[in-house]
Amino acid sequence: MPTLFNPHQSFTSLSLKTAIKCATLCRPTLNMQATNALYTDLSGYYDLMCCDINYLQQSHGIIRLQQLFGNSGIQHLDLACGTGPHIRHFLDAGFTSQGLDLNQPMLALAQARCPEATFKLGDMCTFELSQPVDLITCFLYSIHYSGSVAQLSACIKQAWQALNAGGIFCFNAVDKDKICNLSAVSHSTSYQDSRFDFASAWYYSGNGEQQALKLQISKTTASEHQYWQDEHPMVAVSFTQLQALLAPYFKIHILAHDYERIQPWDQQAGNALFVCIKRD
């Protein structure tokens, strides 16, 4: 069975960023107050923990897709924007960008990084814009943060409503039927006087519409040791199901999960890029 994890993709780019944001973006989380506190505690280390993600490459890859499939407009919205690293590159490329996220501490960091952008605290399944945009992005598997198939469907509809004619919705996703429950990853880094250790694993039971992200994070400073452990539900869909949800609203292109080259999905990989062109 093909594994969800791309061997050329680092731990932080696939799992850690998902872990750091999942709790504040997934409405179905049972202990929301505790989980929000956890990720508020970690928000100051967010960029450190995601330092090996090539945000420039990912952003420029989507800009090329916008030039190829889109309407050439420059109005951009990034869903689940976090601290705004992708938005920074879109702004530098000439886009007028705004970001949406459910974590206020991260939005504060995003506003500092991108003072010329607009940021809003909100839910990507219920958001509304005062003016439509030409491009909506949702990086790093954030589409799964919608939490359930019904909420995912709502997110798709909101994206369709928020786009101008010919606008595109670009995101990456994972196929629940290709998740390897035996795959786990770990990563360590140092910052100032502390050592951080991260470990995570995806899990899908084989039934139902939720997959889990299991997460462990530890911080060691001299003799002080802090430890966080949690498990977060995210929506689980096959690519066949996802296409069925998208089809009423978008013309769909499924591409290989490669931000450097544009090529079709091979129908075997467990992850892919979705380029969705708004239907009239």
Image (spheres, rainbow, N blue to C red):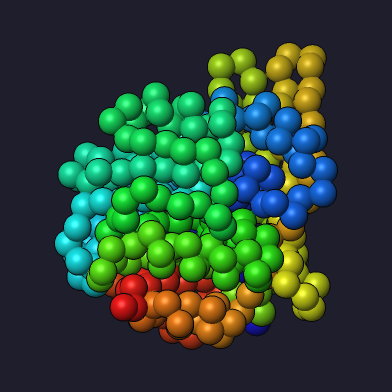
The residue located at (34%, 31%) in the rendering is 114
The residue located at (72%, 23%) in the rendering is 220
Classify residue 237 by image quadrant.
Answer: bottom right
> Where residue 27 sits in the image (x, y, percent)?
70, 51
Residue 231 vs residue 197, the one in the foreground: 231
Classify residue 238 by image quadrant.
Answer: bottom right
Name the quarter where the N terminus is drawn.
bottom right
Going by the image, does 2 lie left or right of 23? left
Going by the image, does 59 lie left or right of 109? left
Going by the image, does 254 lie left or right of 26? left
How many marks are shown on the rendered structure? 0
Report if residue 186 is visible in the image: no
> Where residue 278 sits in the image (x, y, percent)?
34, 73
Q: Is residue 263 above or below residue 84?
A: below
Residue 87 vs residue 45, the one in the foreground: 87
Name the quarter where the C terminus is drawn.
bottom left
Residue 14 vs residue 121, the one in the foreground: 121
> Where residue 137 sits in the image (x, y, percent)?
39, 56
The residue located at (61%, 56%) in the rendering is 145
Q: Is residue 94 above or below residue 162?
A: above
> Where residue 116 sits in the image (x, y, percent)?
28, 30
Report if residue 155 is visible in the image: yes
The residue located at (45%, 83%) in the rendering is 247
